[in-house]
Image (cartoon, rainbow, N blue to C red):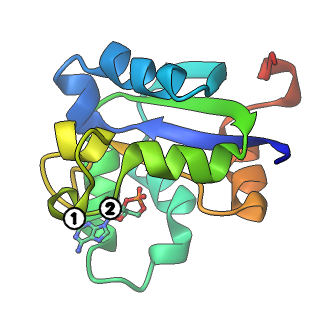
Amino acid sequence: MATERTLSIIKPDATKRNLTGKINAKFEDAGLRIIAQKRIHLTKEQAGKFYEVHASRPFYDELCEFMASGPVVVQVLEGEGAIGKNREVMGATNPADAAPGTIRAEFAESVGENSVHGSDAPETAAEEIAYYFSGLELVG
Ligand code: CMP
């Protein structure tokens, strides 16, 4: 399988509970390398632009408010099949459906406050990485 890069976000519910290290350990234990990482505080507008694809969903406003409610850690994960592997490590969007041992099963509080985001396909991964990082910041 090819080496891929994917965009990951550790969300405000997780940074608030000091879980960045525990979540990063899950990624590294799965063989994903953190090749870029920074802690930032998004504005609601910046969160809204990132999640524009969900603009017509009923939860969009709540999602943008939440993503701007505290610091997030944005990161780029690299590895073989990194996009799918990260989605496995994260678990299902709704923590009630997430497999045991996954990040969302262990740490997420609800479908909205679900601790992590990960890109869902190669095209979105490239777009999402470019939203937060310049090429110079990716150190593989
Ligand atoms: P994420 O992987 O970041 O992509 C979109 C996010 O929308 C998703 O994780 C959830 O946190 C959020 N989301 C999805 N469904 C709902 C919902 N029913 N209510 C609130 N937030 C939701």
Residue neighbourhood size for the residue with mark 1, other residues' Cα within 10 Å, grouped as few (<14), some (14–19), many (≥20): few
| Residue at 80% across, 16% down | 139
Q: Locate residue 25: give its quadrant.
A: top left
Where residue 87 appears, as percent x and y from the top left, is 50, 52
Residue 97 is left or right of residue 11, and the answer is left
For badge 1, the amino acid type reads Asp
Please tell me whether residue 24 is drawn above or below residue 1 in the rendered image: above
Q: Quadrant of ligand 1?
A: bottom left
Measured from the top left, where is residue 57 in percent x and y?
Answer: 36, 83
> Left of 85 or right of it: where is 16?
left
32 lies above or below 20: below
Residue 17: assigned label = none
Q: Is residue 15 left or right of residue 127?
A: left
Mark 2 near mark 1, Cβ–Cβ under 8 Å? yes
Looking at the image, residue 109 sits to the left or right of residue 86; the answer is: left
Q: Nearer the viewer, residue 56 or 91?
A: 91
Mark 1: secondary structure: helix
Classify mark 2: helix, strand or loop. Answer: loop
Give the percent coordinates (x, y) of residue 24: 44, 21
Q: Considering depth in this image, is 119 or 3 the residue closer to the camera?
A: 3
The image shows residue 45 at horizontal and vertical percentages of: 46, 54
Q: Is residue 52 above or below residue 69?
A: below
Tag on residue 97? 1
Q: In the image, what residue occupies the spot 55% across and 60% down?
A: 49
Quadrant assignment for the C terminus:
top right
How crowded pointer 2 is (Cα within 10 Å; few <14, some 14-19, many 20+) is rated as many
Instruction: Tell me the amino acid under the disc marked 2.
Output: Thr
For residue 93, which numbered disc appears in the image?
A: 2
Residue name at image x 30 percent, y 61 percent: 63
Q: Is mark 2 within 8 Å of ligand 1?
A: yes
